[in-house]
Amino acid sequence: MGYLAGRGVDDPEALTQDVFVTVLPRLGSISGGASGLRSFVFSVAHARVVDHYRRHERRPRSVDYDPLLDGRLSSSAEHEALVATGNSDAELLIGKLKGDQREVLLLRIVGEMSIEEVASTLGKTPGAVKQLQRRALKALREHVSEEEWVR
């Protein structure tokens, strides 16, 4: 679910459910042990993210949220919890990365996948994954040094 949330999908819980509905009937045919299962799950998750964004592009644009028009007196408990844990800062930083770089970091860190597993999931070579990871980490370092992230 962290991978899906990191990709910015609207409802990561629903997509996680879709992933497991797809994976469970095929558990008996998966080879490669835990590593093979992890690769398969993240491949399905990646496909669901792509499907989500394709559907999202076909829908008409919604109206942007305007806090001045919000009748609530305070923000949601979920938002306050995310801010308190610092996840919003991490989401902002990861959101500044290019698509492939963000994808590789999320799979490597949140998904705890190896270089080879990420390469297999994304259909890239291990060298390309390493390069994307290096560039992503360099970009994150630059973003952190440019802005004040310490509270």
Image (tube, rainbow, N blue to C red):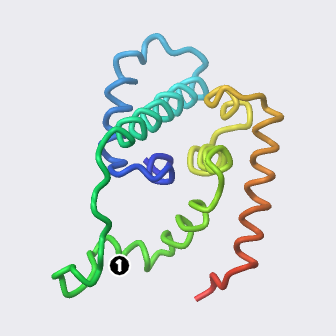
Q: Nearer the viewer, residue 34 or 55?
A: 55
Image position of 9 with respect to 86: above or below: above
Residue 146: name its quadrant.
bottom right
10 Å crowding of disc 1: few (<14), some (14-19), many (20+):
few
Residue 20 spot, x, y in % from top left = 36, 31
Query: Which residue appears at 57% of the width and 44% of the height?
Result: 111
Q: Is residue 87 above or below residue 132?
A: below
Disc 1 is placed on an element classified as: helix
Q: Is residue 22 left or right of residue 151?
A: left
Q: In x, y percent, where is residue 2? A: 47, 51
State the residue lying farthest toward the top.
29
Classify residue 94 by image quadrant. Answer: bottom right
Would you place residue 76 above or below residue 19 in this image? Answer: below
Q: In the rendered view, does 104 fall on the left or right side of 12? A: right
Give the side of residue 110 with respect to residue 52, left or right. Answer: right
36, 60: nearer the viewer: 60
Q: How many marks?
A: 1
| Amino acid found under the numbered disc labelled 1 | Glu
Q: Which residue is mark 1?
A: 80
Give the residue drawn at x 50%, y 53%. 6
Left or right: 20, with 29 as reference point: left
Q: Residue 44's x, y, as percent?
A: 47, 28
Quadrant holding the C terminus: bottom right
In the displayed image of the protein, which residue is found farthest to the front? 60
The x, y position of residue 4, in whole percent, is 45, 46
Residue at x 50% of width, y 47% of height: 3
**Viewer-proximal residue, 63 or 105?**
63
Name which residue lies at 80% across and 42% down: 130
